[in-house]
Structures are given as C-alpha cells and as structure tokens.
Amino acid sequence: MRRLGKILHASKSRSLILKLEKPPPPKLGSKVFDEKLKEVGIVTDVFGPVSSPYISIKPSVTKLENYVGKTVYTLKD
C-alpha cells in the first residue's frame, strides 16, 4: 500500500480532495482505500502545481464528511 495523504474536504461536486504527500501521483482510475482497506473511491483528476499536486477522488462511499481528515492509500503500481 502507498500512503497518498489526508482528505482536505468534499467539493461541491461531491468529490473528495486531498493534497498528495509525495509525488508521483497515482494513475487515473486507481482505487483509493482507507486505513481499514475499505474502498473510498477512484482517482479522477490530478491538478495543481507539479511539486505539490492535489487529487480528486470520485467517492464510492455515501457519508463524505466521515472521510475528511482521514489518511487514504492506494495500491502500489
């Protein structure tokens, strides 16, 4: 597992936004998991500066507010 970072907030379009802790970003379509290995969603966009990008996650969970501030992970490529 690779640690991505903490979820900052849920956007108005119901995506979860996080700041990547360490480049490179995961591939688009990569599955994202919480610390209990429950799938949180998939990576849909990478944006912002190359040195410290942000990631947009399309959630597969319903209560987005429960995930704000949580650390999420992805499978290593």
Image: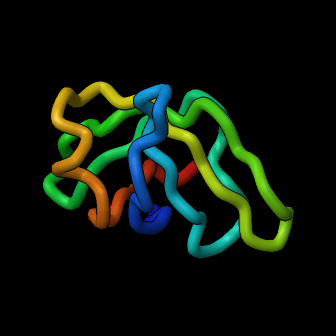
Q: Is residue 73 left or right of residue 27?
A: left
Q: Quadrant of residue 14?
A: top left
Q: Quadrant of residue 38?
A: top left
Considering every residue shown, the one lying at the far right of the view is: 50
Indicate how the structure is coloured in the image: rainbow
Q: Nearer the viewer, residue 35 or 76?
A: 35
Residue 47 horizontal/vertical position (percent) = 75, 48
Q: Is residue 24 left or right of residue 39?
A: right
Please report the residue visible at 31 percent of the width from the left and 47 percent of the height from the top. Answer: 33
Q: Quadrant of residue 10?
A: top left
Q: Is residue 52 left or right of residue 33?
A: right
Q: Nearer the viewer, residue 67 or 77?
A: 67
Q: Is residue 47 above or below residue 28?
A: below
Considering every residue shown, the one lying at the far front of the view is: 12
Q: How many marks?
A: 0
Q: Nearer the viewer, residue 52 or 13?
A: 13
Q: Quadrant of the N terminus?
A: bottom left
Residue 43 horizontal/vertical position (percent) = 54, 36
Please report the residue visible at 14 percent of the width from the left and 54 percent of the height from the top. Answer: 36
Residue 53 horizontal/vertical position (percent) = 72, 61
Residue 67 horizontal/vertical position (percent) = 24, 52
Q: Is residue 39 above or below residue 48?
A: above
Q: Is residue 60 left or right of residue 24?
A: left
Please report the residue visible at 65 percent of the width from the left and 56 percent of the height from the top. Answer: 54
